[in-house]
């Protein structure tokens, strides 16, 4: 009863798309999810960069994707996967509640945004605090915003936002950037970008929505209030591959190593979405990974 052709770990856009493709190839499919169907996209109020759907909430997107996968016959269970073992042709998947076996496993566990760790961050997330400039930047057209972080994501977010926001503060905890100098040089040419070095965000202001932030200079201890509508947190991501580290190869940042065919070094184990090594981590590329991983899994099973 606990044996499937394909077990998919993670029910975000990558995992659920993989389920659709594997079911359409007539494979039995179990999707295991630890938290909630839909993945991180459920926190996005309005998606406007997914082809055809000009505006759709993340919750509606996830709900429709869930219905589509279930409608095609995928079985979904809310269980936390604690490990995957390769037993030759068969893979054993352990959860907090049970054990399952499959011919192919697709790891689509995504990644988590590293949080700033400042008080009220969770409460104001989606109400001015964002972790994705390309998703949410358009809501802050002609407004003042800040980006916090010093890596390539923060630099590129600041560059992107400088084109549409009135003013962009780029707040970094040091006085030199981890991200590429070429991007820093482009940012220096922007008149509406202000660099705030050696600084940390120490308070989020505003009642129901963000109206400003308190920034503390790490060298002098001086506090400064910046009035703004949007705070874009870009302090790195944490791929959710902890349970698979003994099975697959991960890069130094913890991402599962796999190419565009989504195959890992372990035959029959595939990876799809934000927990994979890749350049562009977006809704559309997560869905694309799901399609590729499932198609490769079906090929593997039929070989
Ligand atoms: P990252 O390179 O890990 O940078 C994270 C940044 O956040 C660092 O500057 C770090 O400061 C800062 N930080 C971490 N924790 C913090 C905290 N609690 N408070 C304040 N600041 C904090 O992450 P990323 O920018 O998301 O990039 C991830 C990877 O993707 C990198 O390899 C990056 O090069 C790559 N990437 C590439 C491109 C591209 O090639 N176009 C675009 C985006 C990302 P410190 O520097 O002081 O540690």
Image: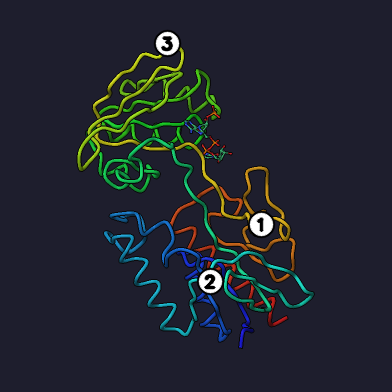
Residue at the bottom extreme of this rendering = 1
Which image quarter: residue 95? bottom right
Mark 3–mark 2 distance (CA, rounded to whole Å):
50 Å
**12 lies left or right of 94:** left
Q: Nearer the viewer, residue 50 or 15?
A: 15
Q: Secondary structure at mark 2?
A: strand
**157 lies left or right of 108:** left
**Which dot marks residue 220?**
3
- How far across and down, in percent of the image, does residue 218 sit? 45, 17
Can you say whether 39 is above or below 156 in the image? Answer: below
Q: Report crowding for label 2: few under 14, some 14 to 19, many 20 or more residues within 10 A (C-alpha).
A: many
Q: Which residue is mark 2?
A: 32
- How far across and down, in percent of the image, does residue 277 sit? 61, 51
Q: Name the residue at 44% across, 61% down.
A: 39
- Tags 1 and 2 touching, CB below 8 Å: no
Q: Nearer the viewer, residue 141 or 16?
A: 16
**Which dot marks residue 258?**
1
Q: Earlier in the sequence, mark 3 or mark 1?
A: 3
Residue at the right extreme of this rendering = 88
């Amino acid at each position: 009863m606990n044996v499937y052709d394909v077990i998919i770990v993670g029910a975000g856009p990558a995992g659920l798309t993989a389920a659709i493709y594997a079911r359409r190839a007539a494979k039995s499919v179990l999707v295991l999810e630890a938290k909630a169907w839909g993945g991180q996209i459920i926190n996005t109020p309005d998606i406007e960069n997914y082809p055809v759907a000009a505006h759709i909430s993340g919750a509606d997107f996830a709900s429709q994707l869930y219905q589509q996968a279930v409608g095609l016959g995928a079985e979904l269970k809310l269980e936390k996967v604690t490990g995957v073992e390769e037993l030759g042709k068969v893979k054993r998947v352990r959860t907090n509640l049970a054990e399952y076996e499959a011919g192919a496993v697709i790891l689509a566990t995504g990644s988590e945004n590293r949080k700033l760790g400042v008080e009220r961050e969770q409460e104001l997330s989606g109400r001015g605090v964002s972790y994705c400039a390309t998703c949410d930047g358009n809501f802050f057209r002609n407004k003042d915003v800040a980006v916090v972080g010093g890596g390539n994501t923060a630099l590129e977010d600041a560059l992107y936002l400088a084109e549409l926001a009135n003013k962009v503060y780029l707040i970094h905890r040091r006085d030199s950037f981890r991200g590429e100098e070429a991007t820093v040089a482009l940012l220096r040419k922007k008149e509406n970008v202000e660099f705030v070095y050696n600084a940390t965000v120490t308070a989020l202001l505003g009642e129901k929505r963000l109206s400003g932030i308190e920034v503390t200079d790490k060298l002098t201890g001086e506090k400064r209030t910046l009035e703004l509508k949007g705070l874009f947190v870009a302090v790195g991501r944490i791929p959710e591959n902890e349970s698979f580290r003994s099975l697959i190869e991960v890069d130094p940042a913890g991402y599962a190593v796999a190419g565009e065919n989504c195959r890992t070094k372990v035959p029959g184990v595939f990876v799809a979405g934000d927990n994979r090594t890749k350049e562009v981590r977006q809704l559309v590329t997560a869905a694309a990974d799901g399609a590729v991983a499932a198609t490769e899994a079906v090929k593997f099973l039929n070989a």
